[in-house]
Amino acid sequence: MTRKLRWLWVTPGVILVVGLACGSAGAADKTKVDEATKQVGQGAKQIGQGELGSGFKQFFVGIGNTIVEGAKYSGENIKEFFQKQKASES
């Protein structure tokens, strides 16, 4: 796979993951999401430097962690939103 073709896949993936991680707003703790997002970036850098095996492993593990932690973070934000709505109704 050529270097240009590889970046056609890696770059949109990183942008998507970072966008999803940063798209959530609220008061919940976001540090785990940020750590997972950094892991994706580090994996992408390794791939760009030619370290394909370890780079892809870290990249995809980072994507998985970002999805998991992002879902937890979003769930907490949704929970807080509905608790505030319920409290304002009573």
Image (spheres, rainbow, N blue to C red):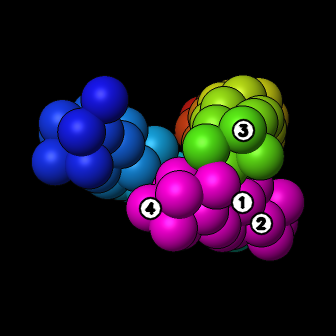
Q: Alpha carbon of mark 1 to alpha carbon of mark 4: how far?
A: 14 Å
Q: Which mark is residue 39?
A: 1
Q: Which residue is mark 2?
A: 35
Q: Which mark is residue 70?
A: none
Q: Main secondary structure of the magenta part?
A: helix
Q: Which residue is mark 3?
A: 53
What is the span of residues highlighted in magenta in the rendered image? 29-51
Res 8 seen here: yes
**SS label for mark 4:** helix
What is the x, y in percent for residue 21?
Answer: 52, 52
Q: Amino acid at mark 3?
A: Gly
Q: Is residue 49 magenta?
A: yes
Q: Nearer the viewer, mark 1 or mark 4?
A: 4
When asked about the image quadrant of residue 39, the answer is bottom right
The mark that comes first in sequence, 1 or 3, is 1
**SS label for mark 2:** helix
